[in-house]
Image (tube, helix red, strand yellow):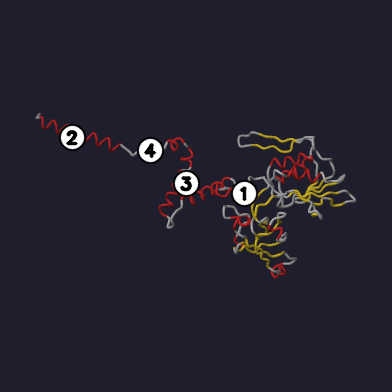
Amino acid sequence: MSLRNIVWISVVMVLATLALVLARWRPITVYPQRHRCNPAVDDLNGAIRAYEFIKRHSYFKVSPDKASRGAIEGMVRRIDKYAVYIPSDEKILIEMPGSGRRFGTGLMVAAKDGKIVVIGSLPDSPAYRAGLFAPMEVISINGISAKYLSEEQAQKILQPTGKDGKDNEVVVALRRFRSSERQARTSAIIIKRLKPERLKIRTVRGIVRGESNRWQYLLDKRRGIYYLRISEFLDSTPAELQEAYCQFDNPKGLILDLRDNPGGTLLSAVAVCDRFLSKGLIVQTVDRNGNRQPYYAHVDGTYPPIPMVVLINHHTASAAEIVAGVLKIHNRAVIVGQ
């Protein structure tokens, strides 16, 4: 065989081998080390592919920041309906839960029978100074009909967050409830402009404020019956309760009002229960791994075992439910309401 033929055969064999190698080869995308080692990337692969699809086909220009925030908000809401996502740029106008400090108008609303209704106003808040008290129906907020607002949306407008929230007024249109539907339709609409401000929340209240603007707790002087209302459970609530109780003069009975109390911090609720119980289990928490954390009552600091009534209603929730339930289970109080 000639040398020329040998060379051609060698070239053909090299090309054939290279073609076989190329046919079996697949492109390998090299990701940063954190992607290869982070299982969260694989967990969220579907979300990433959805984002890429939307970005590629959407008529509108997709903002990465807006898409990321929407995904996080949806994730948090889907996993836990009681949780909320707070972006870093909105932290300046809110405080840690339970601190007793917040920003807003002070108008408290809730959804009832398809309407947004006023359930109260925080003392010394813009809403309180404007004379907005229950029972009232919200007609609109900032020009948006209450028919199109959920309870959560209404609360978010009334308690704004974000760096621009402090500069915005909230315009609320309301109507007072009347004894009949016909009277309600004809009652005057009240329009109030509320400027949100930083509020210091006091959670323990009495019946009325006296001349010195201090709460009065004595309900029935002859029988020695006192009245306490806890609007929510914050870190400051146990100390406020102690401050109020120290003003009692030989109490013979106590009415503890937890109506419309949305709850609050667990440790605050435990501390309040501990004031009325001298022993026994108050509550215990169980995490997803089955680890238990019990909380017990102590004899030190327990108030005298005077007769006690706890008032509740449909809006008594969370930590407030715990307090009512614990006092009932230990036969420490009679529960009135549902």
Helix, strand or loop at label 4? It is loop
Q: Check disc 4 and report the residue beneath it.
A: 30
Of pointers 4 and 3, the one earlier in the residue sequence:
4
How far apart are labels 3 and 1 at the CA level? 30 Å
Residue 332 percent across, percent down from the top left: 80, 42
Q: Check disc 2 and report the residue beneath it.
A: 12
Q: Check disc 3 and report the residue beneath it.
A: 47
Amino acid carrying label 4: it is Val
How far apart are labels 2 and 4 at the CA level? 33 Å
How far apart are labels 3 and 2 at the CA level? 48 Å
User: Any mark on residue 94, and which?
Assistant: 1
Q: Residues within 10 Å of mark 1 (few under 14, many from 20)?
A: some
Residue at 89 percent across and 49 percent down: it is 223
Amino acid carrying label 3: it is Ala
Amino acid carrying label 1: it is Ile
How far apart are labels 4 and 3 at the CA level? 21 Å
